[in-house]
Amino acid sequence: MYNNKTLIMYYLLSVLTCLLIDKAILSHAFTYQKCCKSRDYLQIINNTYLCTENITKRLGILTNETNFLERYSEGECMDITSTDFSNFQVSGGKVVGESLINEKYFPKCCPLNYFYNSVLHACEEKENMTHGYIREIFVKVGLPSCKLIVDYDISETINLYSGIIDVRRNSDYCIDENEKGAYTMRECQENIEVCDYKKCIKKCCPDGKSFVNGANCVDTYTTGLNLTFSTLIENPSGMF
């Protein structure tokens, strides 16, 4: 038989365990709740937050828990703005507060549900991509501010985090799956001398962009640089 002191201790322990589990569940639910649909972001229009199509795709959130604002009228969710990731406080079905999220992000070369074709130097959409190699929730796409980008093939057996990501957190680069089932790292470099031993192409628009309706650089991702159109180019399928 248990004495009263033992029973009280068991009771307190069970209550504490329940509280810890509830806190973990709430924290996990909050972490993965996206305010809008997966392809939308939260935009302020006339002082009102509205879910709008994310045309640029420069930011992404890797989660299956989406469309919080359509399902709940109270609580918190996270989403993309035009420039950042933010937490949003929701009351009465409306966003009433916003705070920036300062978390690690994964530097992906192509938008979510796209992979990088290292021959075409373009992104290709693929259904039901799992992105199992990405540990982070938040994703930043491409190298839009880089003037010189060099591609490197990465063996599929390499540990992306211990070998590259964790040691290059402050570097300007991105990684993505490629058409060969392995990975490609694209690195931003400043030294033009790299063009002495690698093929360099002068591209009019920044990474991920191409001309649309004249000389207007727009995020398209799928329009790359396919050099196989000419027999005069040496090794047109090679890395550059």
Image (cartoon, rainbow, N blue to C red):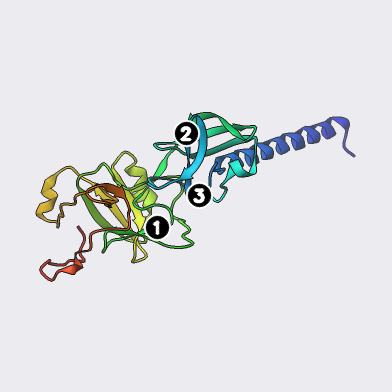
Residue designated by label 2: 44
Q: Residue at x 35, y 62 (%)?
A: 182
In the image: residue 39, left or right of residue 1? left
- The three-letter code of the residue at mark 1 reads Tyr
- The three-letter code of the residue at mark 3 reads Ser
Crowding at mark 1 (Cα within 10 Å: few <14, some 14-19, many 20+): many
Image quarter of the N terminus? top right
Among the two numbered marks 1 and 3 on one chain, the one whose residue lies closer to the N terminus: 3
Among the two numbered marks 1 and 2 on one chain, the one whose residue lies closer to the N terminus: 2
Residue designated by label 1: 114
Distance between mark 2 and mark 3 Cα atoms? 18 Å
Image quadrant where residue 76 sits: top right
Comparing marks 2 and 3, which lies closer to the viewer?
Answer: 2
Crowding at mark 2 (Cα within 10 Å: few <14, some 14-19, many 20+): few
Front residue of 9/187: it is: 187
Q: Which mark is residue 38?
A: 3
User: Is 229 situated above or below 116?
Assistant: below
Front residue of 200/167: it is: 200
The answer to whether any part of residue 137 appears in the image is no
